[in-house]
């Protein structure tokens, strides 16, 4: 497992979204266990945008 340091939450969210979308593209049957609460909201917004842009 790699540790990736980001300068702020926005960058961390976008980086995480990119990692997730790349994993799903590489293996469409990927199963995700996602957290609840307000902390990951920006990540989820980025994933929604990726889907709208044609991830699926």
Image (cartoon, helix red, strand yellow):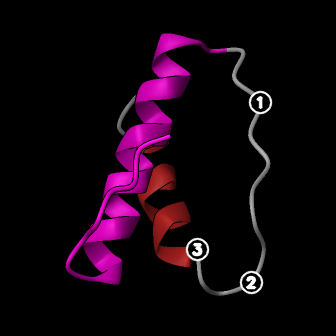
Name the N-terminal-most of marks 3 and 1: 1
**Figure check: 11 above or below 55:** below
Indicate the secondary structure of the residue bearing disc 2: loop
According to the picture, the residue beneath numbered tag 2 turns out to be: 37
According to the picture, the residue beneath numbered tag 1 turns out to be: 31
CB contact under 8 Å: marks 1 and 2: no
Q: Residues within 10 Å of mark 2 (few under 14, many from 20)?
A: few
Query: What residue appears at the point 41 percent right and 40 percent down from the top-left corner?
Result: 19
CB contact under 8 Å: marks 3 and 1: no
Looking at the rendered structure, which numbered label has been put on residue 40? 3
- Magenta residues, start to end: 1-28
Would residue 55 be seen by someone viewing this image from the given angle? no
Query: What residue appears at the point 62 percent right and 15 percent down from the top-left corner?
Result: 28
Would residue 5 be seen by someone viewing this image from the given angle? yes
Q: CA distance from mark 3 to mark 1?
A: 17 Å
**Figure check: 7 above or below 53:** below
- The answer to which quarter of the image holds residue 18 is top left
The mark tally for this picture is: 3
Q: Position of residue 39 (x, y in %)?
A: 60, 83
* Residue 16 among magenta residues: yes
Name the N-terminal-most of marks 1 and 2: 1
Q: Position of residue 52 (x, y in %)?
A: 44, 42
Q: CA distance from mark 1 to mark 2?
A: 20 Å
């Amino acid at each position: 497992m790699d540790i990736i340091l980001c300068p702020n939450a926005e960058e961390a969210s976008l980086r995480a979204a990119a990692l997730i979308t790349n994993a799903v593209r590489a293996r469409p049957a990927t199963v995700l266990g996602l957290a609840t609460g307000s902390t990951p909201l920006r990540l989820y917004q980025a994933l929604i945008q990726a889907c709208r842009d044609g991830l699926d």
